[in-house]
Image (tube, rainbow, N blue to C red):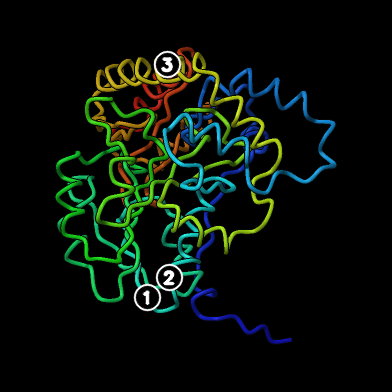
Amino acid sequence: MKLNVPAHIASLIPYPPGKPLEELEREYGITGSIKLASNENALGPSPKAVAAIAANLAKLHRYPDGSCFYLANRLASHLGVDPAALVFGNGSNEIIGLLIDAFLTPGEEVITSHPTFLVYQKVVQARGGVNRVVALRDMRHDLEAILAEVTAKTRLIFLDNPNNPTGTVFGKEEFAAFLGRVPEGVIVVLDEAYVDFVAPAIRLDALDYINGKTLVVALRTFSKAYGLAGLRVGYGLMRPEMADYLHRVRQPFNVNQLAQIGALAALDDEEHYSNTLDMTRNGMAWLRAEIEGLGCRTYPSEANFFLVDVGRGREVFEAMLARGVIVRPMSAYGYPAYIRITVGLPAENQRLVTTLAATLQEIPR
């Protein structure tokens, strides 16, 4: 039997999922491992979210609210926007797909950076679009080079701010100047998955741009600062007339019932949110100082993760994994000398530093 697959699908490389923690422990014969590789919230979910979810488990025979009515209204009040400006998805990943479905036709172009969040380019290719990729400059988005790549076929530009995997950001004046030169009709997507961790003094406010001259969409998520990665709930902020088109292409009931309930409760747990930010900032400062004391260069970051130059990233990753400490090697992103570390709980951070020190004795730079 011959399977006919379009060339742009046949050449698509799947997103590389990590193995379950239990499977890694079984393979390496270890127990009590810690995972500091996926930029998750080490504090876990909000206790209020857990309680709200537990209280609603008996309602799982009901379909979820297809409009996310209560979550939309509560979040709109929190942000000071019209609920019609919000589109919810199965993680902000789904909003990426909805934007491409709604505003890109096959053969048209999307500009992204490299390295960046891998999903942008994969979804563009899957939909028959053309990726135009611009290399980072000094590990930051090269906005000038991105503008130079714009053509008559450009429909969207994706900018993750902070960038994943580098954690770097661009400033307000830089972004305003960039937007002023973006041609009319091109949509600039500002992916703010890690925006909660950015120092307030340099943080962009996407709401300042949504209704400006240039078409701007902001992506945000409950996976990181709110600790609900396992529920997959994110949202896009945009002009209501743009949101209308996303609703036309999204699937009904795309955000599950427990995700809506958990996100609504987490949004009201200001203590857990504040504790997350404090833990992350304190942990980041401590980890960077300790790791630099081991002779490694760390890269400044405005997220809940950072890069470390260890010389031989894959070897260091494997050696640390064998000791039960899981970090992320960066060779797939074009940084073979680096590993990426997510800030954990204080005890996890201490174990990471101790493990890295022992590993570097075996695998010197």
Q: Which label belongs to residue 284?
A: none
Kind of residue indicated by mark 3: Met
Cα–Cα span, label 1 and label 3: 43 Å
Q: Are marks 1 and 2 in contact (CB under 8 Å)?
A: yes
Q: Secondary structure at mark 1?
A: loop
Residue marked by disc 2: 104
Kind of residue indicated by mark 2: Leu
Q: Is residue 220 left or right of residue 109?
A: right
- Which quadrant holds the N terminus? bottom right
Cα–Cα span, label 1 and label 2: 6 Å
Q: Residues within 10 Å of mark 1 (few under 14, many from 20)?
A: some
The residue under the point 30% across, 70% down is 154
- Residue 208 image point, x, y percent: 28, 41
Residue marked by disc 1: 108
- Residue 102 image point, x, y percent: 48, 66
Residue marked by disc 3: 279
- Residue 277 image point, x, y percent: 41, 20
